[in-house]
Amino acid sequence: MDPKRIIIMSTLAFAIAVGMWSDEKYAPTASAVPKPDTLPSLSNKSTAPQEDRFLQALGVSSDEAVQEALYSGKSLASIAEDNQLDVQNIIDLQVAELTDQLDERLINGSLAMHEYESHKSELTDIITRSVYG
């Protein structure tokens, strides 16, 4: 399976899980929508292509190298470690990407502030477990 697909499917599974964790249904109302000054800033996004940052964090030159390593049973952490890179870089990258997705959901009203804060507080732990496989 293509590493991009793995990431996309993992992200999709995470997004579905995030939506299911909610104890209540959320329908945005005028009083429930956060004020613009309380929303997270989206201006700190990197301009480097997402795939390039991912490959750099793992220390590989192509998707095929990642795919081959994953098929052979390696985790993302072991790929980075094999290339003498800090595993925390891949964790930070994935946390940032999922945080951006949560930010988007909060801004477009499909996620309540309490849900956003709850999910965001769990991101690092979830991603860390995923990276170490």
Image (spheres, rainbow, N blue to C red):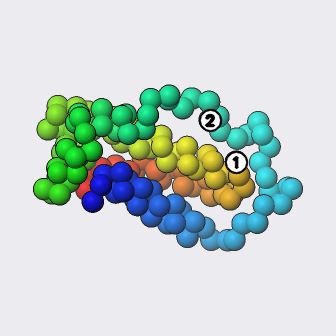
Residue 114 appears in the figure? no
Q: Is residue 22 left or right of residue 36?
A: left
Q: Extreme right residue here?
A: 30
Q: Is residue 73 above or below residue 57?
A: below
122 or 1, nearer to the observer: 1
Callout 1–callout 2 Cβ contact below 8 Å: yes
> Where is residue 112 drawn, in percent x and y?
69, 57
Quadrant position of the N terminus in the picture: bottom left
Q: Residue at x 18, y 38 (%)?
A: 81
Q: Residue at x 68, y 59 (%)?
A: 110
> Where is residue 71 drawn, in percent x and y?
17, 57
Instruction: Work out whether mark 1 precedes mark 2 in sequence or the reverse, and give the earlier one.
Output: 2
Quadrant position of the C terminus in the picture: bottom left
113 or 19, nearer to the observer: 19
Residue 119 appears in the figure? yes
Q: Residue at x 43, y 38 (%)?
A: 50
Dot 2, how many residues are within 10 Å of its Cα: few (below 14), some (14-19), or many (20+)?
A: few
What amino acid type should be assigned to the residue bearing mark 1? Ile
Q: Is residue 68 left or right of residue 107?
A: left
Q: Is residue 30 left or right of residue 111?
A: right
> Where is residue 128 drawn, in percent x and y?
34, 49
Q: Residue at x 47, y 53 (%)?
A: 122
> Where is residue 61 drawn, in percent x and y?
23, 35
Residue under pointer 2:
42
Residue under pointer 1:
107
